[in-house]
Amino acid sequence: MTKIICGIQQMGIGVPDVQSIWRWYREHFGVDVRIFEEAAEAPLMTRYTGGVIHSRTATLALSMESGGGFEIWQFTSRPTEKSTEPIILGDFGLFACRIKSKDVKATHAFLVKKGAKVLSEPQQLPNGSYHFLVEDPNGNLFDIVEGSGWFMDTKFEGKTGGVAGSMIGVSSIEKALPLYQTILGYDKIVYDVTDTFEAFNTIPNGNHKVRRVLLQHSEDRKGPFAKLLGPTQIELVQAVDRTDAKSIFKNRFWGDWGFIHLCFDVQGMDDLQKECEALGFPFTVDSGKTFDMGEAGGRFSYIEDPDGTWIEFVETHKVPVMKKLGWYIHLKNKKPGAFLPNWMLRAMRFNRVKD
């Protein structure tokens, strides 16, 4: 099967307390549909957890408006460690999570009213679209951006959906592009600018010059969940006037505090593995033919970008639609690239958690 990148499935977020931060995400972003919630050990991730098998609890949540979800991840066998150094613009890794909005100015007003830590007024990106920055209670940075490709109208007051991409710090744009353009399919450069930007003035190192390259996929994503996951963009950010940039996860484990991985829903994992190896990005973790997360299952793998940022791939084999009725979608033998019917995707709304 030829490899298919179906969309961003989720942003992994390491947190000290899953339930409290997920409530915040429900109230502020409308990410309120629980796909699974599971406590277990993570034996396949010892490469990134000090050679020790650690226990964790993880919750995957989505917005039915569209966009990728959050995999909210908490160690239960050790504390979730926060970086002892400030995370600075230009550091390497998942610097900010992009959240899609139907009306950026209305979302800004909503988050201000909610008392969120809003870091900037709506500003124009180099392509003319509006965005602003907001920080969650754990200090994670979210970039609220103009969105497209909406799936359902949930009437959420904040007018946001889910994950629409990521701002990623890199040491070299040129070294990063083969992964993001070729393997992940973000083949179109929307802008490539080097300057200082007013929107960054309130974040560490935000007044320094950076190079920003916004990438998007020129072809619509396809696959079972593509209509729900929607279109996304990746913004690569490179510091141009500092030499002390570091990895955001320097001296810490995967799963610790912050954005731990960007996960893509895929089909054709075997062909994807061959392509990654040919381009110098071999799988560093591979679950093999299948894994079981209780309520969901499939195959997952990881690669690293040139600066060690974790990219996860998940080939979904089973996912719950209505858990109370024991209704699951089984995808292992579905036609590659085919969409699930809208009514089936819409049924996932019955897993919504109401506060």
Image (cartoon, helix red, strand yellow):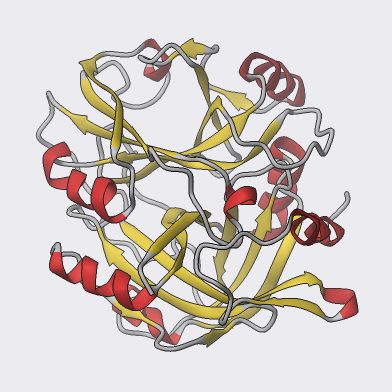
Question: Looking at the image, is 45 positioned above or below residue 181?
Answer: below
Q: Nearer the viewer, residue 88 or 349?
A: 349
Residue 195 in view, yes or no = yes
Query: Residue at position x 32%, y 21% from top?
Result: 206
Question: Looking at the image, is 14 positioned above or below residue 201?
Answer: below
Question: Looking at the image, is 255 positioned above or below residue 134?
Answer: below
Q: Position of residue 73 (x, y in %)?
A: 56, 64
Q: Position of residue 197 (x, y in %)?
A: 33, 13
Residue 263 in view, yes or no = no
Q: Nearer the viewer, residue 60 or 313?
A: 313
Question: In the picture provided, is 267 more to the left or to the right than 274?
Answer: right
Q: Nearer the viewer, residue 196 or 276?
A: 276
Which quarter of the figure is the N terminus placed in?
A: bottom left
Question: Looking at the image, is 320 positioned above or below residue 227?
Answer: below
Q: Position of residue 19 (x, y in %)?
A: 72, 59
Question: In the picture provided, is 155 more to the left or to the right than 219?
Answer: right
Q: How many marks?
A: 0
Q: Position of residue 326 (x, y in %)?
A: 84, 81
Question: In the picture provided, is 248 more to the left or to the right than 175?
Answer: right
Query: Residue at position x 46%, y 41% from top?
Result: 165
Query: Residue at position x 81%, y 57% from top?
Result: 343
Q: Nearer the viewer, residue 312 or 132?
A: 312
Q: Quadrant of residue 309?
A: bottom left
